[in-house]
Amino acid sequence: MNDVIGGTVGGRVLREDAWGKVLGQAAFPADVRREGQIYAVAVRSPHAHARIRGLRLDEARKAEGVVAVLTSADVPHNGHGVLYRDQPVLVADHVRMAGDPVVLVGAETPAQARAAAGRVEVDYEVLPGLFDPEEAMKEEAPALHPEIHGGSNIVYHLPVYKGDTAKGWAEAEVTVERDYQTQMLDHAFLQPEAVLAYVDERGHLVVEVATQYAHYDRGEIAHALGLKFNQVRVRTRSVGGAFGGREDISLQIMAALMAWHTQRPVKMENTREESFYSHSKRHPMRMHYKTGATRAGKLTVMEARIVGDAGAYASWSPNILRKAAIHATGPYEIPHVRVDAYAVLTNNPYTGAMRGFGAAQPVLAYESQMDLLARELGLSPWEVRLRNIYRAGSETATGQVLSGSVGMEECLKAVKSYLGEVSGR
């Protein structure tokens, strides 16, 4: 083991995919071709919330080069999702976010596919949208997914309670209370989504895509198309950036549907604009924090309410808000804690996995609280943290006792020492 560590830590390790990318030999999904392939384009809703009253497809079907025009009626099982199958492959009647795919057009060339897609006419009844998660939580708010998530837009709630907060507030001599908010972020990976789907010589469906989650893709493709799991193969091509943004289905099922329907290879590529509209984002969170401490600088209590905007579909929201709740206290030992974290459905773009997976957003709140407490107490930001940071034997808000590998005190002191040396103080 020591030899392995000695050869890795502090050493130069060659990335397996380095030369292929440096020399331009790596094959990304947009690079792969197959003889006889056609091109598919999704017609997406420009509205965030609407009912579909009708489709007019005749002009699109008559357009030059068109091979097939597909709707929700052509999808055997019209739903997918990592935790809940609440996201349609093609919308049947209820649009829940701008960018929802409604019709799929396949043609001989990309230009022909996009021209035909422009001839599709969708009759929308535009509905009032729910864009504020706080409003969407109210009992009188219309439920966006009553058939899956019940009568509430709260798709997940995790309480994390420890100790006795009444006792903690009685012991607190200084209190800081603030609201914090983080914004929605796009992953903006270099390679927009692309996929090639075809039926191989065995009659099996093959989907070549850049994905973080090939086995999940395989299961969702098989389910949507009514195929057996072993009839579907997903090949992961070079991934041009992901950061969590390729954990959800994007074009995989639509391309597979068109390939299975036409029995021809199908290529799909998102433009950057289509990518922005259609894939998941980082959860914006609203966080209300109230923190108490003694005059000696010891934390006694913390209460937090965290509301995460799940957008139109659940995706990974329960897991993201679970992480936010568990990490809400930061690396600080607090004897009395009350945290409530919620994931709430809205008509905003749906949110999912992104680096940090829900642990990144609460940092703004709990570290700001520590700085404000330091100011109130007349202590340095370093000192207030050193008096409360996790050490071996500390107990987290969820009751976990940290028995080892707790290097935060050593790290904080090393950073302080380094900064002192750099600044000459």
Image (cartoon, rainbow, N blue to C red):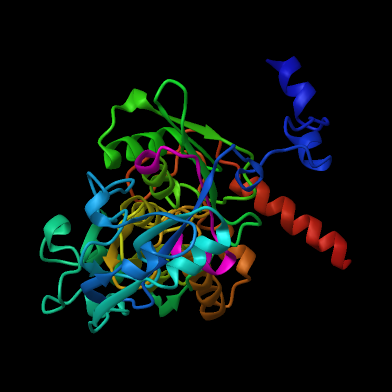
The answer to whether residue 200 is visible is yes
Residue 8 appears at what percent x and percent y? 76, 26
Q: Is residue 222 above or below residue 371?
A: above
Which residue range is magenta in the image? Answer: 260-279
Asked whether, in this view, residue 35 is left or right of residue 284, the answer is right
Residue 376 appears at what percent x and percent y? 51, 80
Asked whether, in this view, residue 373 is left or right of residue 129, the answer is right
Reply yes or no: does residue 30 show up in magenta. no
Q: Is residue 380 above or below residue 199?
A: below
Quadrant holding the N terminus: top right
Asked whether, in this view, residue 226 is left or right of residue 360, the answer is left
The answer to whether residue 298 is visible is no
Which residue is located at x 39 percent, y 34 percent?
A: 218
Q: Is residue 168 above or below residue 227?
A: below
Q: Give the quadrant of residue 192.
A: bottom right
Q: Is residue 313 above or below residue 35?
A: below
Depth check, front residue: 416 or 61: 61
